Amino acid sequence: DKESLFNAVIQRLKEQAVFQELPSDDRHPVADGLPRRLHAIFADAASPQSMIVSKLAMREGHRFPDLVPLLVEGTRDRYTRPLAAYLDARKLAGELRDCDTLEVSEMALDLIFAELSRSIYTDTPVPEALIRDCAERIAVLLLKGIAVR
């Protein structure tokens, strides 16, 4: 049935690691590492497979209320927690002020998904140039608030 299929797709997405090539502590300055991570998240979330899942959630979420929390948790596992782990490592390195890195990561994802939602509404793919630009702008915005000056 549709619910089982949707559940299987989400589980498969959760199994794919976005940050295999971007460890939580790669010793790169946060000004370099954060935009790279945001770009990786954005590009992955904008992939055709991920966009289909997002479209299904928007269209069918009201019919399958148990699936939306599963999708939210999958997003936390796949994107938010790894990003927070990276920010924690940069905080320990003295590059970031004391902040709630999970909250900062959730805010970053909110900004990314706002842009993706526009693409979903218009049913158009997200161009690489937009992904790169948005990742950079989001990183700059976040760093203004959390970076040690």
Image (cartoon, grey):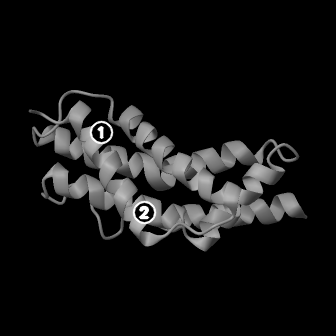
Secondary-structure class at tag 2: helix
Judge whether 1 appears above or below 143 on screen.
below
Q: Which residue is the site of mark 2?
A: 131
Label 2 packing within 10 angstroms: few (<14), some (14-19), many (20+): many
Which quarter of the image is occupied by the C terminus? top left
Badges 1 and 2: C-beta atoms under 8 Å apart?
A: no
The residue that appears at 49% across and 56% down in the rendered structure is 78
- Counting from the top left corner in percent of width and height, residue 84 is at 34, 43
Q: What residue is rendered at 61% in x and 59% in y?
A: 119
Q: Nearer the viewer, residue 43 or 117?
A: 117
The residue nearer to you, when weighing 109 against 111, is 111
Q: Quadrant of residue 94?
A: top left
In this rendering, would 144 be left or right of 82? left
Characterize the local packing of mark 1: few (<14), some (14-19) or many (20 or more) Cα atoms within 10 angstroms. Answer: some
Question: Is 30 rendered above or below residue 1?
Answer: above
Which marked residue is nearer to the observer: mark 1 or mark 2?
2
Q: Quadrant of the N terminus?
A: bottom right
How many numbered callouts? Answer: 2
Q: Position of residue 83 (x, y in %)?
A: 36, 49
User: Which badge, 1 or 2, is on the more N-terminal residue?
Assistant: 2
Which quadrant holds residue 51?
bottom right
Mark-to-mark CA distance, 1 and 2 = 16 Å
- Tell me where residue 16 appears, x and y as whole percent: 51, 68
- Disc 1 marks a residue whose amino acid type is Leu
Which secondary structure, mark 1? helix
Question: Does 90 sit left or right of 75 as displayed?
Answer: left
Q: Which residue is mark 1?
A: 142
Q: Amino acid at mark 2?
A: Ile
Rendered location of residue 131, percent (x, y): 42, 62
Q: Nearer the viewer, residue 118 or 99?
A: 118
Q: Horizontally, is 135 left or right of 59 in the view?
A: left
